[in-house]
Image (tube, grey):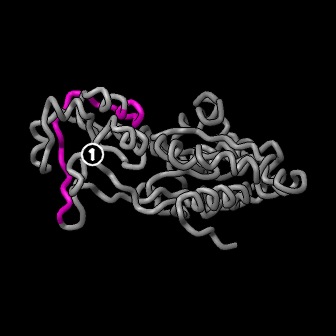
Amino acid sequence: MSTPERTDLADFRLFLAVVRRRSFSGAAIELGLTPSAASHAIRRLETRLGAKLLNRTSRAVSTTDLGAKLAERLEEGFDLIASALEDLQAPGTARFGQLRLNVFRDAAHLLVTPALPEFARQCPDVRLTIVVDDRPIDIVAEGYDAGMRYGHHVPEDMIAVPLTGPQQWVVAGSPGYFEANGRPETPDDLASHKCLQLLLGDNAAYRWELGRGDDEQRLRVPGLITINDTTTTIEAAKAGLGLAYLLQARIASELSQGTLEIALEPYSSEGAPFHMYYSSRRHNHPALRILINIIRAQNGLPRLAG
């Protein structure tokens, strides 16, 4: 096997992207290449190393044993490079460099926005990028330092830190809707109501979860309107278009103003807390710990030690 040259670094980076995504086209999009250029670069790398790194079929891409070992060592190497570059920043908080987060919309509204002023005060030189995205993604493959999701949606190979306590999910509607259509008293009553369908980030329809423990029910509810955005759902519910299934914290202002009211309150459901998560293999960004502690403090949780 020949000794790698400095020009191999770009090809190594591409190789890692192909391994993470299990796709030449996905890796090419990530790095701004054409699929043919990506395929040519990997073949060039294999020729230079004198070893086959990837198995290719018409349907999938997988690593050879040697390719898997190389990918593991390269991940470690690129993480060390990233850590070294962060340490070369200016003294103080400026050395934290850039922090890139992927968060879903409700978390952005409830957790990130309130934390930003204090984060900016404590980390004035950090370049913070927040991408709001409800899709389930691979944060490492897409270049994020951390992600924010509900605990049960965090991949098993990630380190997850709770940011809140359990979240309350409720059925809500407008006073006008209840006046025109009546108020459901049991989950079975929803069969005769208009319900705003909830679409998840992976485009799957969500069943409403009502009750707790052994009494929990997961229901398919009737309704002709399907929405994948909480803000739009809230506005539709306020307009009287149907009942909505929402985080109670997300509609706190609407409940206090009386534009929405909770129905079926005895059947409200307790959901998973919000979590920040990041790769166990990636350098723990110091500014990330600061942001986590700000959010935890604002939600009544103790600071992380260390």
Query: Residue 63 lies in magenta, yes or no?
Result: no
Q: Farthest residue to the bottom: give it.
A: 305
Q: Residue at x 19, y 67 (%)?
A: 214
Going by the numbered disc 1, the residue's amino acid type is: Ile
Question: Which region is colored magenta?
Answer: 215-234
Query: Residue 231 lies in magenta, yes or no?
Result: yes
Q: Residue 132 appears at what percent x and percent y?
A: 54, 38
Nearest to the observer: residue 100 or residue 186: 186
Q: Is residue 218 above or below residue 206?
A: below
Residue topped by disc 1: 262
Nearest to the observer: residue 250 or residue 226: 250
- Name the image quarter holding the N terminus: bottom right
Residue 287 visible in the displayed image? yes
Q: Is residue 127 above or below residue 240?
A: below
- Name the image quarter holding the C terminus: bottom right
Q: Residue 104 appears at what percent x and percent y?
A: 49, 43
Q: Quadrant of residue 165?
A: bottom left
Q: Farthest residue to the front: give it.
A: 257
Left or right of residue 155, residue 204 in this image: left
Nearest to the observer: residue 179 or residue 295: 179
Secondary structure of the residue carrying tag 1 is: strand
Nearest to the observer: residue 116 or residue 68: 116
